[in-house]
Amino acid sequence: MSGDTQQRADGADRVRDVALLRAMLRVRRFEERCAELYQQEKIRGFLHLYIGEEAVAAGVLQALGAEDAVVATYREHGHALLRGVSARAIMAEMYGKQEGCSRGRGGSMHLFDVATRFYGGNAIVGGGLPIAAGLALADALQRRPRVTACFFGDGAVAEGEFHETLNLAALWRLPVLFCCENNLYAMGTALARAQAQTNLAIKAAAYGMPAWTVDGMDVIAVADAATRAVAAVRAGAGPFFLELRTYRFRPHSMFDPELYRAKAEVEEWKQRDPIAALTARLRGAGLVDDAALAAIERDAQAEIDDAVAFAEAGSWEPVAELTRFVYSGPASAGAHT
Amino acid sequence: MSGDTQQRADGADRVRDVALLRAMLRVRRFEERCAELYQQEKIRGFLHLYIGEEAVAAGVLQALGAEDAVVATYREHGHALLRGVSARAIMAEMYGKQEGCSRGRGGSMHLFDVATRFYGGNAIVGGGLPIAAGLALADALQRRPRVTACFFGDGAVAEGEFHETLNLAALWRLPVLFCCENNLYAMGTALARAQAQTNLAIKAAAYGMPAWTVDGMDVIAVADAATRAVAAVRAGAGPFFLELRTYRFRPHSMFDPELYRAKAEVEEWKQRDPIAALTARLRGAGLVDDAALAAIERDAQAEIDDAVAFAEAGSWEPVAELTRFVYSGPASAGAHT
Amino acid sequence: MTSSASLSAPTTSAAPAAPLGPLSSAPLAPPSAGAAPPGVVRTTYRNAIREAIRAAMLADERVFLMGEDVGRYGGCYAVSKGLLEEFGPERIRDTPLSESAFVGAGIGAALGGMRPIVEVMTCNFSLLALDQIMNNAAALLHMSGGQCNVPLVIRMATGAGRQVAAQHSHSLEGWYAHIPGIRILAPATIEDARGMLGTALRDSDPVLIFEHATLYSLEGDLAADAGEVPIDRAAVRRPGSRVSLITYGGTLRKTLQAAEQLATSGIDAEVIDLRTLRPLDTPTILESVRKTHRAVIVDEGWRSGSLSAEISARITEGVFYELDAPVARVCSAEVPMPYPRHLEEAALPQAEAIVAAARATIGADG
Amino acid sequence: MTSSASLSAPTTSAAPAAPLGPLSSAPLAPPSAGAAPPGVVRTTYRNAIREAIRAAMLADERVFLMGEDVGRYGGCYAVSKGLLEEFGPERIRDTPLSESAFVGAGIGAALGGMRPIVEVMTCNFSLLALDQIMNNAAALLHMSGGQCNVPLVIRMATGAGRQVAAQHSHSLEGWYAHIPGIRILAPATIEDARGMLGTALRDSDPVLIFEHATLYSLEGDLAADAGEVPIDRAAVRRPGSRVSLITYGGTLRKTLQAAEQLATSGIDAEVIDLRTLRPLDTPTILESVRKTHRAVIVDEGWRSGSLSAEISARITEGVFYELDAPVARVCSAEVPMPYPRHLEEAALPQAEAIVAAARATIGADG
Ligand SMILES: Cc1ncc(C[n+]2csc(CCOP(=O)(O)OP(=O)(O)O)c2C)c(N)n1
Ligand SMILES: Cc1ncc(C[n+]2csc(CCOP(=O)(O)OP(=O)(O)O)c2C)c(N)n1
Ligand SMILES: [Mg+2]
Ligand SMILES: [Mg+2]
């Protein structure tokens, strides 16, 4: 798959491609701010940045409709934001404030928003895949032409749940778009040290599932592939597998000393920064200029400043409510302390 | 893979092929007796018969040496017998007598014999695969040119542990021979209702593992394939996957009403009975005659009669020993009642 | 909810029928002999569950059943026999052997608006799905700040007693009761087998139902109009005054037998069937012990860390000064289940041990 | 085994250092200030475990370490940092994310004559391997009639306190202690971090070691010649007479703090560190309660069905007539762990709650 803006400069694509730039930039700036806020101890616990991988979420999520569903991992700020969860609600969540999208209960790894059908924020590697299959099963049983997009890393491919879920989805022809964010590492474990078969799309053949390998640093390629794959899934062709080859520019989490990869390798990948690449292409095609770029930056900054202010002004849930949400219903039914 | 006795009638093959017949017949007659003993309530609990599938165990196990290891499932009487566990010890185990190969603790599903490196008898579907990888890892680390043969059913292929183990074994080039006994059903679930990809050997490609599909009703084909695969594994080529296409003539267990398959289908497969097939071939090639066959039958019956007598004469472990073998060491260290 | 359910011996047991009361401690109905009285049907625990599934599926299109061999095979314990023919393969779904995936898919389907019944063939295999149960089913509502309800019912067989040895004899329901966010049910009677599922399906949170495998063939009477039952209260199955015998699930019958034996020597034991293992109905337990001043807990789980420990601790915490003797426990031996019958019987709680524990408790207050 | 280990505050905690005694209730060594005395080294819990792994690998060729990111990454908690360089990739094995397979492979390797140390990054992920642990590691010796020993050590991080929310904050060690056939260790001190692993590797049966994640950065003194320690006895970490505070692992420090607070108001509390959660050292527990007549159990597990319940039940069973007050428990709230610090702190056992429970127990005997 590849996208070539030169040949696709019709109006709709033009709008889409600029939107993709805007999307990636929002995510980038949002997370850069998160990193700062982590240093300031405003955000605590684990924080996994998506910086470098934005093209994947941006390209895939633009292909979905409002009725579709998304299941993501602990590295999901970008996915939440681009799915339409407000920066305010996300930032407040990362602060642990009750104005957060999960009322502060979840934090960075557990962003949820039922209104946009964003089903987390799953921090057990591979744990989201069966849930995605189930969401799709619900759609299939109710004859709703919806798609569930399920994001997971290359590391998850080794988990048993990957295998079980891909088989189940293929067997039952469930409308799932499996999006493997192959950033070449699972924490410090390089793909070749985790997988006997490093061509991950080949794995899909073991389930008779169509699969494409996509350059995950090229947001237009991702968007094109995802748009076609989503159409196929929605049309009832069963699940689809996308391997999105990408790279994380930052450490795995804020604790990672990055002993396992060379600085030079990281620098090389940074040359392929998806935001810089798209910016150059759009500029080259005359689709954006300095003023437009500055406006995009300004908007992003404004959105983030607003989100931070919102989070700062947010409130802590009273300790008396500790055992809420263990069970449904009025109070803390069934919870014992 | 296929074996043709006509073309291979040299002395060694002749001996091997007759031995294969003897092996299959021992297993068949042993299990026929087990079925009777189950009716008589001498054997209790679950009983899973291998009748119809004997060519698989017979063909594979003849390829192993004494230093090799075997991991099997709950349908493992034949494997234990052909691995060299005595019919006496197996039968006593199925009676629950302390003279059994697992001191009566395990029963039909948990035959163990460390002396012949027979590591069970695992009744969790897929649960034996990681153990086989570990046995092979121990061999690899100790530079022992051994092979671990791991038997499992078509049903196990859907389990996450299958996926995790095949990847691990391939990644680490562990000396495991994976033997998938594809008898087309997992209890009542036909392969096509459990697997999106019913060509199981294709799955091995997802791990970069060599694989052969073998006619599991043709014991000579199995033996030839296993011999070659074992040689490759022993030579350090890493793991090997054999899909052995076979059929169980009997119900899944003694409780199975067999609602899920047609009698005609079973009858059709019975036409391909591996014992009858080999008998005909050996007769045709002049390798056995009526007298030889009768002798084989007589030996099998004698062995089984002796085993039953042994089991009958066996003793019950005293109840006072209930908490033995929970922990090692003298008494029931650490066990509390 | 009227009830004249009575508890007959299962086909495999020589034990005499012991009468069971309704949930309240109203006087017990006499055991029915021969033909069922009018308004009452003769049935089995197995059929009662099947009826519960049928009724739920007929009443609510969102309900479906999935699990290993629930369809063409007819269910490992024949519970779902005939349902595939009645409801078709969309709603009676055979799954591959993929416990984690299909339990997780049940969670996802619940999030997606369905009311799935997931059958995990036995609790022995549920360990393969435990991550989904603890980290997703039980946690999603909380992690999402109250957004993601998981109205999922998971059924599984549990328990020992059939000589199926170490990997097929676990009693894990009490252990599962440690997990916040789920509800745990243990139907011990035909009435509860019939009634708990429907109520569980109305719950907005995940409910795990553990069906003791030795109960499926249990025969008894059931009101023809039997339906849903409450799932938040323990039941006094036999009122008594001298000692509280507290149990659930597969050991209820043995405990009732023990109570009958005790009665013959003049000891009037109260028998409590917990029914719901999480959340525990502590008030009913404490009320009973406040009356009897003595308690014996009977639990098929391995003793250490079994639910019996929690109950003992709660009794101590709640009515310590009312106790005339230490709370006693009759549990399974701490051993992977051995295959031979005599060892399995020795490993499991038996009526004799319950009687002995009750007597010791009574003798103990000097 | 001489010991002058002392327990300093971890870098992230403002708590003052509390002195720790050796295993026996010998008089406590004074807390070391500044430079370590001769024969003693200043170290951390993390480094002590690394030293234990190194020593075991140097002493026995059959020992190897495998798990996720134990090699090139240096260990999720930096425990194994440097070991790959020292021992090479054959013996320090990075595994794929396949918890069930590599735990099972550890079992198989143990059957094959090795002495594997399997690191499951945290107990939260161990649920994915629970089938292998319960149905194989714990059961093989028994199912095989005594033939198949599984000399396997599984290490995992456990516990909450770092704001990593519901899926990364479980304390499951007490829950695992329900399973017969395995031994459960919870090193709470640097001495035990250094000493338990080696002893565990000599055990012929599977041993699970739970390392509380908040302890890794704990600093303290350790005898230069520190080595293996017994793994079958609880330790009296602070002798006392008025009330027994019974705990283990991550809550030992808080419990010692509580004891100090109680001391300031004249209440002399005994603090017992269980160390081994299965099998429990019941005699040491009972001996203490026989002396103090009161017990408070502190357990980071969710209250219902936590190990605290088992301990309470055993105390009731063992020394009921010695008790002057009901056995009390201070446990975690029954809630998947919330992310915000104030809610997490409220969910976890804290020194104040321990003090209050101890006081209530003492006030309670009227
Ligand atoms: C089952 C499980 N095992 C281990 C972990 C610890 N862990 C968190 S993220 C991670 C690496 C996952 O890598 P990958 O799937 O490639 O995603 P990425 O972080 O690269 O986006 C690991 C090992 C976990 N969260 N869950
Ligand atoms: C994990 C697990 N799930 C379910 C079962 C129940 N069960 C026992 S055998 C079996 C079918 C297995 O089929 P297959 O692997 O094809 O082996 P076969 O019995 O055909 O030899 C099932 C579902 C089990 N033992 N373990
Ligand atoms: Mg990755
Ligand atoms: Mg099969």
Image: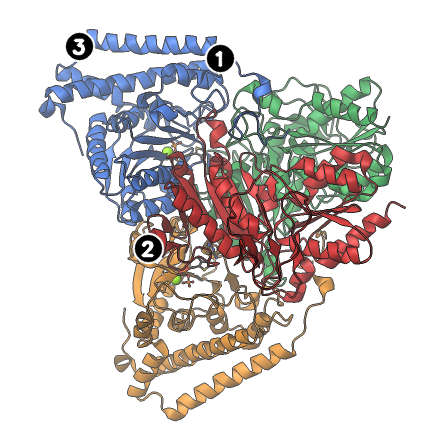
Chain colours: A orange, B blue, C green, D red
Label 2 crowd (10 A; few <14 / some 14-19 / many >=20): some
In the image, residue C131 above or below residue D136:
below
* Residue B244 picture location, percent across and down: 28, 34
Quick check: is the Cβ at mark 1 less than 8 Å away from ligand 2? no
For the residue pair A41 and B278, the one nearer the viewer reads as A41
* Residue A159 picture location, percent across and down: 41, 51
Which residue type does callout 3 highlight? Asp
Instruction: Check the image and name the residue furthest to the bottom.
Output: A291
Which quadrant of the frame does ligand 1 lie within? bottom left
In the image, residue A11 above or below residue C172:
below
- Say which element carries label 3: loop
- Say which element carries label 2: helix
Classify residue B61 as left or right of residue C323: left
Which residue shows up at 48% across the image and 68% down it? A254
**Residue B40: numbered disc:** 1
* Circle 3 or circle 2, nearest the eye: 2
